Amino acid sequence: MLVAPSILSADFGKLNEEIKAICDGGCDLIHVDVMDGHFVPNMTIGPVVVGPVAKAATKPLDIHLMVEDNSFFIDLYAPLKPEYISFHIESEKHPHRVIQKLRGLGIKPAIVLNPHSTPESIEYLLEDLDMVLLMSVNPGFGGQKFIPSVIEKAAKLKELINKRNPNCLIEVDGGVNDKNIHDLKEAGVDVVVAGSYVYGSSDYSKAIKSLQV
């Protein structure tokens, strides 16, 4: 299991130290939540903050857009050379166009599904994706409780992926901890995002390793 700590839960007063701590602690990716205050009722950070994060990081960035204008935000973040940029299927009328744009920029495209959205809704996009991110909370705020039905949803998605594009990863974001990690692994999840579980612990390395099952 790959682990992508979410910097949304980090102490922004010492962000460089927080980034170094999770990289030294053995994380696989650094998850960056970008919210515009329109698609979700919250605003987070822009390239002015994420730029120094990218410089401090020794692990690849995994940028999660929770925005209405995906193309605009992709242009903002592409210069930081993230490994992945994920966008919500619920916010995009022309997902193929966005996927092609990301490919053209050398960024791995990923699509996000909110808790109510079905895996079948993106079946015909799977061949063009490197990852699908399943939200196990409603997007917009950190520290929410895990929605258990995402485990069944991940298993269904895994069946579609095996049929359409076995190289596509499944990522889960929201309420992940050492209590549900084994169920997620069994369902076929490859990557987990962990914010408060990692940054709320006294030992980041130990918390990260407890999820790398």
Image (cartoon, rainbow, N blue to C red):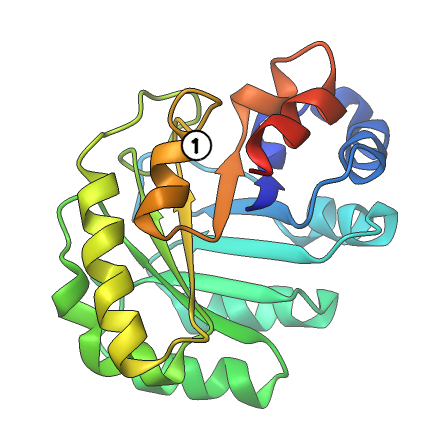
Q: In the figure, 154 relative to 88: above or below?
A: above
Instruction: Give me the residue at 71% from left, 21% from top.
Output: 206
Q: In the figure, 182 relative to 46: above or below?
A: above
User: Which image quadrant for residue 5?
Assistant: top right
Give the number of marks.
1
Would residue 125 be found to the left or right of residue 81 on screen?
left
Residue 38 can be seen, yes or no: no
Instruction: Give me the residue at 17% from left, 36% from top.
Output: 149
What's under tag 1, amino acid-wise?
A: Ile
> What residue occupies the far top of the structure in this picture?
202
Would residue 21 be found to the left or right of residue 34 on screen?
right
Where's residue 75, x and y in %? 57, 73
Q: Nearer the viewer, residue 6 or 51?
A: 6
Q: Nearer the viewer, residue 178 or 51?
A: 178
Instruction: Give me the residue at 64% from left, 71% from top.
Output: 78
Q: Nearer the viewer, residue 97 or 68?
A: 97
Q: In the figure, 192 relative to 16: above or below?
A: below
Image quarter hosting the C terminus: top right
Would residue 112 be found to the left or right of residue 195 on screen?
left
Where's residue 163, x and y in %? 25, 79
User: How busy is the neighbourhood of tag 1: few (under 14 within 10 Å), some, or many (20 plus)?
Assistant: some
Q: Which residue is mark 1?
A: 181
Disc 1, SS = helix
Instruction: Give me the residue at 48% from left, 85% from top.
Output: 101
